Image (cartoon, rainbow, N blue to C red):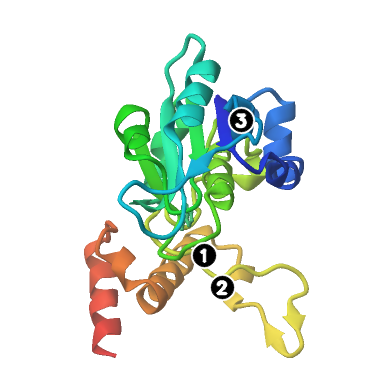
Amino acid sequence: MLVDIITIFPQMFQGPFAESLIKRAVDKGLVRINIHNLRDFTHDRHRTVDDSPYGGGPGMVMKPGPIFEAVETIKGEGAADVILLTPAGDRFTQQIARDLAVKGRLTFICGHYEGVDERVREGLITRELSIGDYVMTGGELAAMVVVDAVVRLIPGVLGSAESLTEESFSSGLLEYPQYTRPEAFRGQRVPEVLLSGNHEEVARWRRDQAIRRTFLKRPDLLEKTHLTEQERRLVAGLREG
Ligand code: ADE
């Protein structure tokens, strides 16, 4: 996968992408991440990327010229999805991460100020994403979040030790409780079933715990999860208290 990120703060990306799984994915050649300074696509002495809004009002608007030039310059041959990070975008979810993980090429534009000129939206952007209902100082952190969640889904990025099959949101449920050594810690013991060696019982306990936890913390997720008849009865029981 080729990822291009267009930003006025290229330095912000040095930390997160220079560590951990993302760095490993880059080193393995599974993804290339190019960071582009939007100001490199300006032509005035002050390297201006924003201006005041037509019609008046507070704040500044990102100019269309530098953004168009940046996207057209880095585009080369291959077409890419062009994603704007903005609080007004679609809420980013694991399903969107899965959809993006199969693309060969993604271009991210980190929004700033009061927004971007509408002609950028109309002429360049194929998708707008928000990482949650809060406002950050810019789209940079949001781009890092999206790239992180997408890159880890690229085949080969996770080792078998970090398998994808049982994690939260793939099953539609939150994760079940996990324990590791020691067996007793500050008076609290690991649930007996996990020491039993009975894989079927362990699997049933985990699924049951995941459903209970999801019911308590994120009941909205249960609406979209496929449950067996028996599991639906469990949820009905939890509802009745
Ligand atoms: N820019 C500012 N806040 C944002 C958010 N919540 N998601 C995406 N981009 C943003």
235 relative to 27, above or below: below
Q: Secondary structure at mark 1?
A: helix
Whether pointer 2 and pointer 1 mark residues with C-beta atoms closer than 8 Å, the reply is: yes
- First in sequence: mark 3 vs mark 1: 3
Q: In the shown orientation, is residue 75 left or right of residue 235?
A: right
Q: Residue at x 63, y 25 (%)?
A: 30
Q: Quadrant of the C terminus?
A: bottom left
Q: Amino acid at mark 1?
A: Val
Which label number is shown at residue 193? 2
How many angstroms separate mark 2 from mark 1 (CA)? Answer: 6 Å
> Quarter of the image holding residue 119?
top left
Above or below residue 241? Residue 194 is above
Secondary element at tag 2: helix
Amino acid tagged 2: Val
At x 58%, y 44%, the residue is 148
Mark 3 lies within 8 Å of ligand 1 (Cβ measured) = no
Residue 48 spot, x, y in % from top left: 58, 37
Label 3, label 1: how far apart the Cα atoms are = 28 Å
Of labels 2 and 1, earlier in sequence is 2
Q: Quadrant of the N terminus?
A: top right
Q: Mark 1 — residue? A: 202
Determine which quarter of the picture holds residue 128. Answer: top left
> What numbered label is drawn on residue 156?
3
Crowdedness near tag 1: few (<14), some (14–19) or many (≥20) residues, C-alpha within 10 Å: some
- The answer to whether mark 1 is within 8 Å of ligand 1 is no
Point out residue 10 in the picture as x, y percentages from the top left corner: 68, 39
Q: CA distance from mark 2 to mark 3?
A: 33 Å
Q: Residue 77, position in %: x, y? A: 48, 9
Of residues 157 and 235, the one nearer the viewer is 157
